[in-house]
Amino acid sequence: MDFYRPGNNFPAVSVTGTRCQLNCPHCEARYLEGMKAVDTPEELYRLAIGLAEKGRKGFLLSGGCDIQGKVPVEEYLEVIGNIKDDTDLMINLHTGWIDEDMAVKVADTGVDVVSYDMIGSRDTIYGIYGIDLGPKDIKEGYRALESLDVTVVPHITVGLDRGEIKGEFNAVDLVSDSRRSIINSLIPSKSFGHSIGDEDFMAVLKYARDEIEEKIIIGCMRERGRPDLEISALELGVDGIVMPSKKTVEWAEKHSSIQWYEGCCAVYT
């Protein structure tokens, strides 16, 4: 079993600070608050060099989205290439929705991996993100990156639409040939959504395990405090968990050997 703990060895960096033009109800930009903020490519380069000097593993580059659902990373792509040339850092780039022209530019950077949100319902894409795209549009960006030999790791959030199942099985179908897939769950707030039910989560996970031949990881963007669900996922046959609970680790130690990674799960393909 593979367990992951990114921590200081693999910090998350935002190119928009705490700003997001979409301000979707399931997030409201609050997940950007814990990220390191950079305002310019030069600032990102200095941050990266500092991480390399400290012996860190790498970083996630993300941020808030523009009104089209894209993370505005284009002006940072050249410096990403420079960082890859000048350091051994691994870089996980979160782009949001991507088109073919942008895919070519991303491929030219030599970035290690792109984390890509896969959503299987047009109603969810519009209702949550406010973007007039369908699952096939989202998949086109994913396929564009793959065609350029970029390692793309799809992320599927179970219960994204207010804690209900809407399109998750379709999302699995869209990425069934992926080398590695990340399954998350909605983190409900007081004003939005509710916890995804155990049966619903496990139904999607079982479908994913049946359809996806390669690795499935339970990701970091999920509701915590549910160790029994984590253990059920391991019993089902998922390959790893990011930041598992203490109870899960204790269970795993009795049932299998564990490999710990001090970094983001997406880069360890």
Image (tube, rainbow, N blue to C red):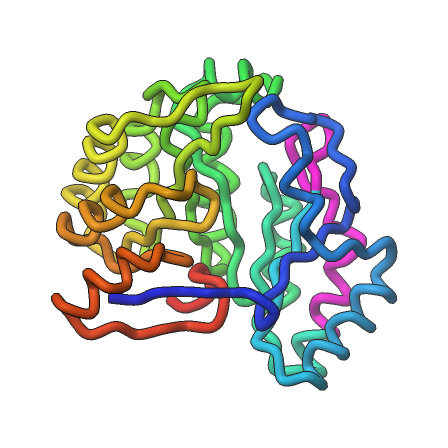
Task: Name the residue nearer the viewer: 264 or 153.
Answer: 264
| Quadrant of image for the C terminus | bottom left
**Quadrant of the image for the N terminus?**
bottom left
For the point 34% across and 27% down, the residue is 196
Please name the residue shown 78% across and 37% down the image. Answer: 19
74 vs 222, left or right, is right
On screen, residue 240 above or below 27: below
Q: Is residue 176 above or below residue 135?
A: below
Foreground residue, 253 or 127? 253
Task: Determine which quarter of the picture holds residue 27.
Answer: top right
Q: Residue at x 33, y 59 (%)?
A: 246
180, 29: nearer the viewer? 29
Residue 258 position within the rendered picture, expressed as x and y whole percent measured from the top left: 25, 72
- 184 relative to 246, above or below: above
Does 70 lie within the magenta span?
A: yes
* Residue bounds of the magenta highlight: 64-82
- x, y (%) of residue 146? 45, 53
Horizontal side of 26 relative to 183 (left or right) equals: right
Q: Residue at x 69, y 53 (%)?
A: 35
- Residue 66 in the image: state x and y as whole percent: 73, 32
62 to 30, vertically: above or below: below
Q: Percent from the top left, x then y, of residue 2?
A: 30, 66
